Amino acid sequence: MSNSTHKAEKATSKPRIYDDKNLEIVYIEDQPSRIEEKMKEFRLECNKSLHQLRETFQGYINQVISLEKKTETTVLNLVPKDEIFIPNALYVGIVGISGSILTRNRNILLRTLAPLSLGTLSAYYFIPGTTNNIAKLIHSSYQDNKHLFNNPFGAESSFTSSTSSGDSSKLETTISEVQSMYTTRSDPGVRAVLEQKNE
């Protein structure tokens, strides 16, 4: 019996693993320092900037993906279903290169035109459907953007823009200023030149 009482005494003398249930938990509220507030603002600004950068980057990626899909559908629509494209396109390339080989010691104009003309003619022979579709696509693109080809820089002369707006007093002022610069001539003829240009 002495052995069992010794074990019981030993068990009661060990410290407990768990805290007492009667302990009171006290929360201490600490006000953030200026550095902590500045770091919080900096972190929020960085997160905001990263979010904006991510959205901008995603917008660019979406534009590239839409351009890729548009290009893919255009290319798929160019090649007819009944036409064997790959070997015939290789034939066209070989004929174009042979035009360069045939004219290697000739004039620079002939060396430039021979591969282009032979390649185009062979394309109409080997892949006629694709070549016709490409020609139609180029023609429709030209028709859609005709204003860019007619006036590539978007510039109009100042005289035509001023006369089209109906500002005749400004035109008269300009004519008198230009004529006053040429006082040595009896008839400077500025009005006649501008009227000819306007017609």
Image (cartoon, rainbow, N blue to C red):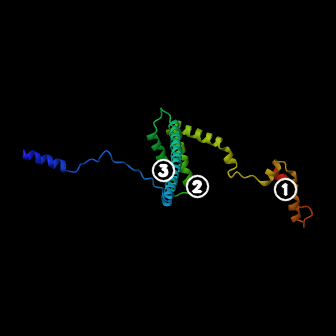
Q: Which mark is residue 109?
A: 2
Q: Compare residues 121 and 134 and report the one nearer the observer.
A: 134
Relative to 71, say whether 28 is above or below.
Answer: below
Q: What kind of residue is marked 1?
A: Val
Q: CA distance from mark 3 to mark 2?
A: 16 Å
Q: Which mark is residue 97?
A: 3
Q: CA distance from mark 3 to mark 1?
A: 53 Å
Looking at the picture, how far across and down is residue 20, in whole percent? Answer: 29, 46
Q: What kind of residue is marked 3?
A: Ile
Q: CA distance from mark 2 to mark 1?
A: 40 Å
Looking at the picture, how far across and down is residue 121, in whole percent? Answer: 54, 43
Looking at the picture, how far across and down is residue 130, in whole percent? Answer: 52, 38
Label 2: few (<14), some or many (≥20) within 10 Å? few
N-terminal-most mark, 3 or 2: 3
Residue drawn at x 62%, y 39% is 140
* Label 1 secondary element: helix
Dividing the picture into quarters, in which one does residue 30 lie? bottom left
The residue identified by callout 1 is 193
N-terminal-most mark, 2 or 1: 2
Q: What kind of residue is marked 2?
A: Leu
